[in-house]
Image: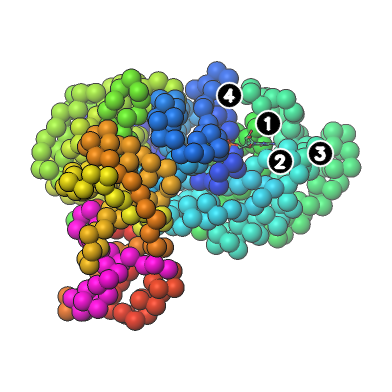
Amino acid sequence: MSQSAIAKEVAKRRTFAIISHPDAGKTTITEKVLLHGQRLQKAGTVKGKKSGQHAKSDWMEMEKERGISVTTSVMQFPYREALVNLLDTPGHEDFSEDTYRTLTAVDSCLMVIDGAKGVEDRTIKLMEVTRLRDTPIITFMNKLDRDIRDPLELLDEVENVLKIMCAPITWPIGSGKNFKGVYHLLNDEVILYKTGQGHRIQERQVIKGLDNPELDTRLGDYAAELREQIELVQGASNEFDLELFLAGELTPVYFGTALGNFGVDHMLDGLVQWAPRPLARETDTGEAIAAASPEFSGFIFKIQANMDPRHRDRVAFMRIVSGKYEKGMKMHQVRLGKDVRIADALTFLAGDREHVEEAYPGDIIGLHNHGTIQIGDTFTAGAKFKFSGIPNFAPELFRRIRLKDPLKQKQLLKGLVQLSEEGAVQVFRPLTNNDLIVGAVGVLQFDVVVHRLKSEYNVDAVYENINVATARWVTSDSERKLDEFQRKAEVNLAFDGGDNLTYIAPTMVNLSLAAERYPDIEFHHTREH
Ligand code: GDP
């Protein structure tokens, strides 16, 4: 395929993910986005993962539901002239390292904030991850049909807490029972809100121009108030700037209600207009691979086991970086130095698995996998480079894992190492004792691991609490200093599943003291594969 034909496909694509705190409205927005993308006849058919639904972290229950929820892992749909890929970011109990890593596979993010609550913890964490690549962020202030906080105050909070400038694109007129709609600052038009339209695509009711007398007729006293407010907002806030947005320094902000299906389309308009086309990706050779380069390449950012009870397999999710995927094509798996023929890649068109015939940069395809594919693997048309920027993230939760039958130590270790290669959890072996420490980003992963150890490795394991607050991968420019560190800090050191030296800190204070005490040692929060 010619470079210009690929460039044309690339230009159409926008690949993004949603970052939000649980219950801010990610699932609801996803539904509405798909409604606009004409992938759902009627909103309300994407099964959400409600808090409490697996409050007991029941893996079996979870797996049963997975057939439904996981088919929404990647959703592709057309919107206006664009083809949009929305990657799901596991959010409630299934929050995990996958959530973080998915953010390294997209070109932009939609940040959803509950307008009554403002910036919440999980959002802060996820924003940190997007900073690794300075990913452009679009913001949606949700739940305007409820009484929200003062919108200017909300923008201030985003600017101060998340350290990103806000440029409102729409501005709300009232909230709660008095939510009337929004004023679009760039288009100079008021778009009126109508209740009870949550499940349908509504025709926009637009009043052109802030000075339009029709506003007074339709909004009464709100019209004068709005004019005053807009003057204030225009004076007090940043104007939208495409360059700053693309650098991840400024976020366009939209107001609306996902439940009422109002404002989601305004946001989508901004997304397809401004969000980056599939970007070039860095490699270990120091050369970046542009999306429009004709040779095929891609990388694995997620592996999912037992996705669908009817197909008990593992699927590796690949982000295509360049070239074109065609059914039956041969790919080179760089880490193994092996060529593989891919006849049956999957995609997930908001519902059923479908086989893809072809796919382009920015698209995600699923490869069937019987344990030979790892997180971070690069596939090419034959070239030997590896993509960088698909890291492991320091776990945030830790437990000691112990066997019920001590004779199976070898199987346990093998299972844990393989599961860590899949990105399910991380495993650490302390230098000074025989403990095995499992580290995860989300709590459900612990149950997933015990369940899979039993069913795939025939090992019965249990957890015990352990006093670990965090872990950091350690390196140093000086081998001598690293050796010295290894001797002196031995009791806090461990090897991870890939034999990388890791500092295991009982408290955050301990970690900062160690960093002070050993200035020649670098403590890393992420580790490249
Ligand atoms: P998620 O956890 O971020 O996926 O959040 P959900 O989409 O499941 O929403 C959490 C709760 O907030 C659900 O009960 C939704 O119905 C509700 N919700 C979502 N968007 C809105 C909105 O715009 N207005 C109101 N009133 N409720 C909303």
Report helix, strand or loop for mark 4: loop
Report which residue position mark 1 lands on: 260
Q: Report how far apart the C-alphas of labels 1 and 3 lie in the structure.
A: 14 Å
Q: Report how far apart the C-alphas of labels 2 and 1 lie in the structure.
A: 9 Å
Q: Nearer the viewer, residue 311 or 170?
A: 311
| Residue under the point 35% across and 23% down | 309
Of marks 4 and 1, which one's residue comes earlier in the chain? 4
Q: Is mark 1 within 8 Å of ligand 1?
A: yes
Report which residue position mark 2 lands on: 144
CB under 8 Å between discs 1 and 3:
no
Q: How many marks?
A: 4
> Which residue range is magenta in the image?
481-507
Report helix, strand or loop for mark 2: loop
Q: Please check the rendered image and state whether residue 505 is part of the magenta-colored stretch, yes or no.
A: yes
Q: How far across and how far down the image is residue 454, in percent?
A: 28, 36
Report which residue position mark 3 lands on: 178
Q: Report how far apart the C-alphas of labels 3 and 2 lie in the structure.
A: 9 Å
Q: How far across and how far down the image is residue 113, in percent?
A: 61, 47
Q: Quadrant of ligand 1?
A: top right
Of marks 2 and 1, which one's residue comes earlier in the chain? 2
Amino acid type at mark 4 = Ala
Q: Is residue 162 visible?
A: yes
CB under 8 Å between discs 2 and 1:
yes
The reply, left or right, for residue 64 in relation to residue 483 is right
Q: Is mark 2 within 8 Å of ligand 1?
A: yes
Amino acid type at mark 1 = Gly
Q: Is residue 296 visible?
A: no
Of marks 3 and 2, which one's residue comes earlier in the chain? 2
CB under 8 Å between discs 3 and 2:
no
Amino acid type at mark 2 = Leu
Report which residue position mark 4 lands on: 43
Q: Report how far apart the C-alphas of labels 4 and 1 lie in the structure.
A: 11 Å
